[in-house]
Amino acid sequence: MVTPDPVAAYRPLAPARADLVAWPDVFGTRFIVFVDTEEEFDWAAPLSRDAHAVSAVAAIPEANRWFADHGVPLTYMVDYPIVADARAVDLLRAACADGVSAIGAQLHAWVTPPFDEALTPFNSYAGNLPRALEAAKIDCLTEAITAAFGTRPIAYRAGRYGIGPNTLSLLAARGYRLDSSMRSRYTYTADGGPDFSVIGNAAFHVGSGSGLIELPLTTVHTGVLRRQGAALYHALGSVPKGRGLFARAGLLSRVALTPEDMPLHDALEAIAVAAGEGVRVLNFAFHSPSLVPGHTPYVRDAADLAVFYGWWAAVLNDLARRGIAAASLDQVIAAARARR
């Protein structure tokens, strides 16, 4: 077993100014919603190759209709257990018949063949695997999605945000056009994952002429001390309960744009801050098992599910009030490439 070394963790560099996406003026400020479409498993248990189910996918048609009624296309980042299930594929194919929702790829390394690695937290970050093995898993997932849906996926997300030094070049070589594996201002070095501390919310082009763009998951520092955000938040991590105390005092919070464990008040403040800072594409996400109570820590019962949809209703109203419209995956990619 490999012992994680925080010093040796993968730390992508902040993009050069010249690589930032120059969004067309006509595109305005938009938002996109990704759904991590995956199996259900016990989040508190050790990772397993087979202790999972895919029953929650049955809730996707209703959820897709709810978002469609609010004018929001969804991009389903599908992993291997989902694409290997015929019923799940049928349900997702029907959802995407609306012409604006899309299918992308999400690689959970521990449940995606080939299984040539030990089952450890370190290896669950696909970017930690040898280049050839990571490539083989990406190919397996990509080919399975292509066969199931008849279209090759062009958007990718690494499960656990686990990209590594080889991931983006592997994706570009396989025709992917958008990666959304970087979680702005988060770090996962405790058990061997990557460190995105210097990654902000701006989309950027990856490599010269690769055709791949990175769209980080939007994360915003809010509170009175938000301008000291990244450095202060990092320092508070070494103070017992420091981050919680500062958050409750309204001094500093780190807010990701997701209904999962992010209170509505914080999310609305984060949207205001992001818009004020000039973020042109707000990137929202949630896990598909949260659509059914009992499968994630975020939606434990019917009351939590009502809160989940209430969160979205309030957020969508706020975005509409600000003139921030929804965008499909194709619209985001086309706009990002317009001036490149």
Image (cartoon, rainbow, N blue to C red):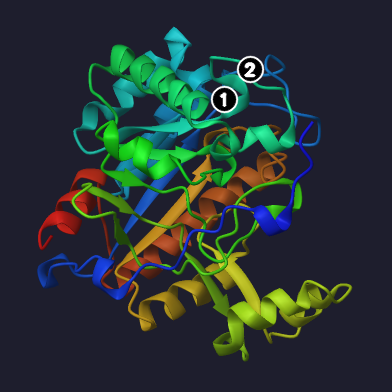
**In the rendered image, which quarter is residue 19 located in?**
bottom left
Answer yes or no: is residue 185 visible: yes
Write the residue at 53% across / 57% down.
311
Q: CA distance from mark 1 to mark 2?
A: 8 Å
Vertical placement of 195 versus 247: above or below?
Answer: above
| SS for dot 2 | loop
The residue nearer to you, when weighing 219 against 100, is: 219
State the image coordinates of residue 309 (x, y, percent, origin top left). 52, 49
Between circles 1 and 2, the one closer to the viewer is 2
The circle on residue 56 is: 1
Residue 301, horizontal then vertical, whole percent: 71, 39
Q: Is residue 81 left or right of residue 225?
A: left
Question: How many numbered markers are drawn?
Answer: 2
User: Is residue 1 toward the left or the right of residue 175 in the image?
Assistant: right
* Residue 29 screen position, x and y as percent: 26, 69
Give, as a three-letter code, the residue at label 1: Ala
Position of 144 compared to 233: left or right?
Answer: left
Question: Disc 1 vs disc 2: Cβ atoms closer than 8 Å?
Answer: yes
Q: Residue at x 48, y 66 (%)?
A: 199
Please tell me which residue is depicted at 47% across the width and 12% down the height of the picture.
84
**Hey, which quadrant is residue 100 in on the image?**
top left
- Whether residue 75 is visible, yes or no, is no
Q: Secondary structure at mark 1?
A: helix
Disc number at residue 106? none
Is residue 181 or residue 226 the one in the foreground? Answer: 181
For residue 53, the mark is 2
For label 2, the crowd category at 10 Å Cα-Cα, with few meaning under 14, some 14 to 19 and many 20 or more, is some
